[in-house]
Image (tube, rainbow, N blue to C red):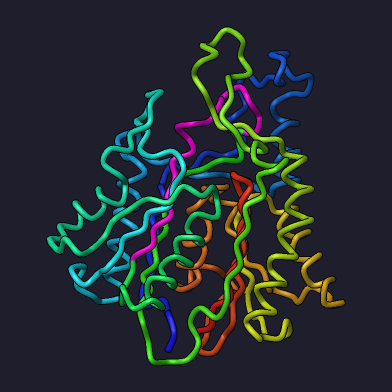
Amino acid sequence: MSVRIIGSGCFVPKNAVTNKDFGKFDFRDEHGTVLKHSNEVIARKLQEITGIEERRYVDDDKLTSDMGFYAAQKAIETANIDPETLDYIIFAHNFGDVKKGAIQTDLLPTLAARVKHNLRIKNARCVAYDVLFGCPGWLEGSIQAKAFIDAGIAKRCLVIGAETLSRVIDLHDRDSMIYADGAGATIYEFSDEKGGILAHETGSFTYDEAFYLFFGKSYNPDLDPDTRYIKMHGRKIYEFALQQVPQAMKSCLDKSGVAVDDVKKIIIHQANEKMDEAIVSRFYKLYNKEVPKNIMPMSIHMLGNSSVATLPTLFDMIMRNEMINHQFSKGDVILFASVGGGMNINSMVYQF
């Protein structure tokens, strides 16, 4: 028996925000001092490090739960199932529904409950709940779905990852240029076929690392200090990720019994191109191997970092043949990996 993906979908907002669009922003450092470099230089350096050329922001009248609903609809359509047959709806996010211009998040009811409501599912045994696990939330929700199916208490689960980071960024912090909006969804089902989810690994590093990502005040001292925005200690996250993520990936792959040479694609959280490249390089060095060509598809260049949405969105884009030179075939083994707020890390091996 196995737990397999039978459908996927994503929602990519149409509003593209290029690096040039930040030209007139008032960027400052954590002490409130205006940065010495021009915005053009700041944007160029950001692109060199992260690979981001543009990112997507959702329409002003749409929310995180709306994007999750649209992605879920596509996944259900692809799977060709009756939504009434879903046993679980697991919605991974971090900030809930934040209206444009608001300073308060809305989590009542949960986003999963909103999606179930909008799908017009009558089945009360379809359990809907949210997961707050940082950027690795969708992958952790997928691991939970496998646990439910393996335990025999579910046969079919919908897992959604969505975020509207454009609503929680400090426009005076240059790190705000990294973040984006989006949603992705997958449906997992019990199967008699071999393959599916072969192994998974999760860790939460909180002793020293818990506040590498946090909510803090604006870098503009004239703004209300009690209004909070997403902040990060970028260098610490980079060093942490390079040390811990490759080890988690190796542990996961070793548990699966799959040889590293048989991995066809690595689907990694789209946080930072240089960081992702370094993580994958270190992963292969653990096996005394060189990184294979075309192993790591990247969507960050045009979509930015949409947190929990990056993995399911990238997966769905490949499934729909929207990523040049990247396809999945029967029997292919792919390795998922993510790192984010908490600090949480996870990995999963999946075979088609």
Judge from the rendering whether residue 152 lies leftward or rightward of residue 197; answer left or right.
Answer: left
Q: Is residue 256 left or right of residue 233?
A: left
Image point (61%, 67%), residue name: 201
User: Eyeballing the image, is 222 above or below 175?
Assistant: above
Residue extent of the magenta highlight: 158-175
Residue drawn at x 76%, y 38% as measured from the top left: 45
On the question of residue 234 being in view, the answer is yes
Above or below residue 80? Residue 245 is above
For the point 33% across and 34% down, the residue is: 106
Q: Residue furthest right?
A: 288
Residue 182 appears anywhere in the view: no
x%, y% of residue 214?
Answer: 60, 33
Q: Nearer the viewer, residue 161 or 157?
A: 157
In the image, residue 174 lies in the stretch drawn in magenta: yes
Instruction: Note whether 172 is above or below 46 in the view shown.
Output: above
Percent x, y of residue 341? 59, 44
Q: Nearer the viewer, residue 221 or 133?
A: 133
